[in-house]
Amino acid sequence: MASKRLILQFLLKGRRLVKGTRFKGFTDVGDPVAQAVIYDAQGADEIVIVDVEASRKGAVIDPNVISAMTRQCRLPIAAGGGIRSVRDARTCFHAGADKIVVNTAALLRPKLIRELSEEFGAQSVMVSLDVKRGPGGLPVVLACSGSKAVAGPLEEHLERAVSLGAGEILLTSIDREGTLSGYDDGLYARTAEKVTVPIIASGGAGCYDDLVRLFQGTAVDAAAIGKMLFLRDYDVIRIRSYLRWKGVTVRDA
Amino acid sequence: MKTALAAINGIERCSRCTSPVTWETLELDKEGVCNVCRNWEQKGGKVDWAKRERMFWKIARQAKALKRDYDCIVPFSGGKDSTFTLWKLVRHFKLKPLVVSFDHWFYRPLTLENRARTFRRLGVDVLTFTPNWKIVRKLMLESLIRKGDFCWHCHAGIYAYPMQIAVRHKIPLLIWGEGGGEYESYSKFMDLEETDSWFFHRRVILGLSAKDMAGFIGAPERYLSPYTYPSKQELDDAGVRSYPLGKFVPWNVQKQVAILKKELGWQEDEMETAYEGRTYEKIECMFEGSRDYIKFLKRNYSRMTHLTSLDIRHGRMSRKEAMRLVQRREGKRPRSLEFLLEFLGISDQEFHEIVARHLIPPARVVDPKSMKVERKLWDQDRWLRDRG
Amino acid sequence: MARPFSVGVVNYGIGNVGSVLGAFEFCGCPARVVERPSELARFDALVLCGVGHFSMAVSRLDASRLREPLNEQVLGRGKPVLGICLGMQLFADYGHEGGRTRGLGWIKGEVRRLPEGGAKVPHIGWDPVLPKDRSMFRRVRYHEFYFMHSYHFVPKERSVVAGVTTYDGVEVVSAVRRGRVFGVQFHPEKSQGDGLRVLSNFIEAARGE
């Protein structure tokens, strides 16, 4: 079995990385390149960087940030924020991204996933879905950084994304995002078994045991970590040691 | 909230030493033995120390053959490790070093004496750098808030500044002290890693670089230059190699302290958290006790655990005896904290709120009011109180 | 003084060459991008990388008129070459991604889709490589590398297998070697320290050290 991946989630706003709670109330958490170098050295498995304003502004994530990161780091980097076309995606790949992340544009125009997948291969296309628990606890899919609800059950969105050629799903629980209160394990237990491509859980990591519970209780392939690393006294090496002690398969790095 | 003793007794520990599972990078195996103890087995076993010393002689010969003003740089604080390193390099390996000392601002009176005595007896050139105090104060508070650790300026400055000097003065060799793997398992005795950029970013700077910090405290980047690691290009151009002596010479702190006392008149000092016969570690910093206090609140262990674990591994103490010492002496409130809070410019309550946010479960929240207060250090009233 | 050893990273409009250039630079052996067929001869060693489809990669390679000059350099002159991910898959006789397409045919075999049903496809993540050709994995510490693929190389002869990886029960050939033709299914340029060690080993082998 592949080692469970620990993925650093970078939110880019202007020239700096930020972190908030439920996509609001952002705090500066550093320079994207400096932080990438640090987490590369700590042995993170991957970095996902998304520009949080690009989509709303009608822009695409700055390729200069991507190229500066990829030039100095030796780990896979997925980049997103405002990607609407094959051309936008190509700009990111040329800058050095290994994968691209699409969210809002893929919800508004699902065929974009197929176009990207055919051009760059499924393994390079990560579809990001943000969900919030609605009435009765049912997950509702949201677009535009969680501000706009999209019709249709989560399962339908997942199936469509995979059938159109998504190579990976980044599934974020907005309810938990930045709260440090643990992953929404129930959300991932239901989805990770059914979906045939790797799933990355995101939102809520706050301590070692949150990660242990996620990996032992669900079939997700990877965990995205943000605030726990940026604003608490943890590092990737310590997290790995703890997970290994608890019997979770992680890479030695 | 727990009392200190309840927290001490409530945490799972290595069955051989006293390290708890909140110890950085600790893993227990099926027998309940931690990876630091396992790593320790390699130290006596597989590592060929005679070969390692020959390797170091070769490095020393190559450095001398360059015939520059200095053979190497020794980053120096005046604590037991850097003093031993300097002594060993000058007296044993016959190197002519430039001593580079990043003054973290908190040397205690006895440390200043130890430093001066060492420099006089060994006959070395010394470059001491003192960073901007106003920036230091901001960095201390910022790193406390972000990482529950007020020592970022010291970690980053101590490791980055001597590298800058190496680049600037084209001195292509730096020799550090302890080789890692004594107290944690970030590195293994078998690995011959350099103390390089990778190590700096992985291990030293708490996930925060100078560039990050400049933004956080709202200072131009050039004010953070003492904390900035040279680029790969700069280091490659100057051909800088940077090794810990502990990878070439087996580290035995107690023996080394005895040598320092005999050869250099080096003195131990009173400490807020240590037991008799072990008062030689981190005496170069006024806030050793406060740092340990934070560690206890975050991870439910501190220096008593660490010192007894070392004593157990060296076969100098039984685990039972060690646990008794930990239970009796760990988890006290230090008097140096009052001083620290003045420098940080925050109240006692604010301080404890910040630290509480940094609890590392399975450690438990300890009620600060349940903790006994340590005796004041002999020299605390002599420390300079001026906040600048 | 001897001319510095030069590595050319072949850019046929499909690869993510930036990371590969960065990684070679890190190894102390700066590489350059090769775009024109006439430039191939100038380099001491070549790298083929790639992201995307087999058939699309082949058609781009042909459109750039690189096939014959590459054959000439690699087969004719025995120039060392390293294929990364899709770049390694192109060594095969045929690929099945985007319809059956003729590859470079430097190493006998086919490129097939990873079997569905068991493990997740695409295979994305860090997995251990069991070395068969030790020289390609010298000094490597943890033997885990980053993979990102839906198709895999099935060589005809076992003798070319330089490393294998078992991914959820499926055995994947993760490294191949035939003489001076080296290929890896994983991404050494994205695999931190061990990845750099694999690249350094290639550089040393290419230099004949």
Image: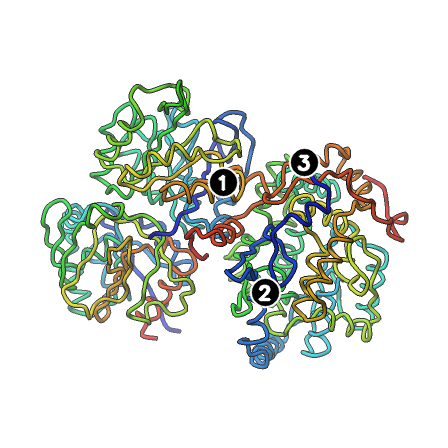
Q: Nearer the viewer, residue A171 or C10?
A: A171
**Res. B220 visible in picture:** no
Label 3 sits on a secondary structure element that is helix
Residue type at mark 2: give it.
Answer: Cys
Query: Residue B38 appears at what percent x and percent y?
Result: 55, 66
Rendered position, A188 above or below C143: above
Residue type at mark 1: give it.
Answer: Asp
What is the number of the mark on residue B37?
A: 2
Q: In this rendering, do the residues under marks 1 and 2 share a single chain? A: no
Q: Residues within 10 Å of mark 1 (few under 14, many from 20)?
A: some
Which colour style is shown?
rainbow
Q: Residue at x 29, y 42 (%)?
A: A124
User: Gap in Å between the C-alphas at discs 2 and 3?
Assistant: 33 Å
Label 1 sits on a secondary structure element that is helix
Label 3 resides on the chain identified as B
For residue B178, side relative to residue B196 (left or right): right
* Number of numbered tags placed on the structure image: 3
Q: In this rendering, do the residues under marks 2 and 3 share a single chain? A: yes
Rendered position, A153 above or below B159: above
For residue A131, side relative to residue B257 (left or right): left
What is the number of the mark on residue A210?
A: 1
Label 1 resides on the chain identified as A
For residue B299, side relative to residue C161 (left or right): right
**Res. B55 visible in picture:** yes
Q: Nearer the viewer, residue B97 or B246?
A: B246
User: Gap in Å between the C-alphas at discs 1 and 2?
Assistant: 27 Å
What is the number of the mark on residue B354?
A: 3
Residue C69 figure quarter: bottom left
